[in-house]
Amino acid sequence: MPNHDDIYQNDAERYHKLISKQEDLIRHIEGIRSPDGLDIVDLGAGSGRLTTILAPRAKSIVAVDASDAMLRINGERLKAGGHDRWRTVVADHRSLPLEDRSADLVVAGWTISYLGSSNVPNYRDNIKQIIGEIRRILRPNGTVILFETMGTGEETPNPPDFLRSYYTALEEEYGFSHRWIRTDYAFDSIEQAEELCRFFFGDEMAERVVSNRWQTVPECAGIWWR
């Protein structure tokens, strides 16, 4: 499996090319809460998958990520879009350099799982710290929306075993509601699908792309909110 930390720091452009092949998620966010006129924090903002679709409608938006390389791309995209009520912050989710009660909406896409995986030491403490930080920065009646994987190459939810405890904790310990959606990748060609899937998901997924002749690669994602 490729080293994602290395990718996020050293190959952010190619990662952005991969996720640009997915439909944007604004309608799924709107279905939970309208972002219009809100102060928003995007955790694990990366190259701007969520930041750039929320920025045009937000009162303000703060993009937080551990990778300065990813945030550079995010900032470039925000500037290109003519947005001026944003900033980027390099930080760990467990210790956010943000003020108490400073956000109406916190979103996080495919990011808390890196610290919430049962493969990671003290993962339960990590989840507790992150949820605690989210609660701290949210205003009364604020909303948090989390997106996480439910299986790449899957047409129905089949999450990795190492994330099941995290997902269970969100619902049973922290009171999140949950549903799932499809987040398929629509590539320009089978060759592009193979190359980008091998780059990020590894050889096994790339071979499935080739054997199934997938130009559109199926993927499921979960949405948790409260």
Image: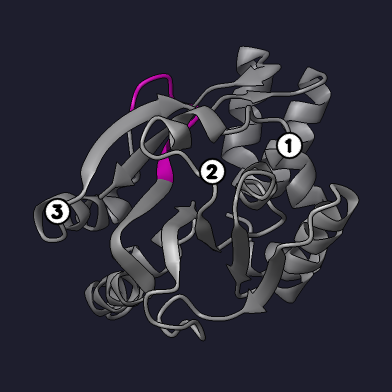
| Colour setup of the view | one colour
At mark 2, the secondary structure is loop
In this picture, residue 81 sits left or right of residue 148: right
The image quarter containing residue 154 is top left
Give above or below for 164 relative to 111.
above
User: Which region shows up in magenta?
Assistant: 148-157
Q: Which residue is denoted by mark 1 in the rendering?
A: 20
Q: Which residue is denoted by mark 2 in the rendering?
A: 36
Magenta stretch: includes residue 23: no
* Mark linked to residue 8: none
At mark 1, the secondary structure is loop
Q: Which residue is denoted by mark 3 in the rendering?
A: 175
Q: Residue at point 65% right, 16% down? A: 214
Marks 1 & 3, CB-CB < 8 Å contact: no
Alpha carbons under labels 2 and 3: distance apart:
25 Å
Estimate the x, y position of residue 16 in percent, counting from the top left. 76, 48
At mark 3, the secondary structure is loop
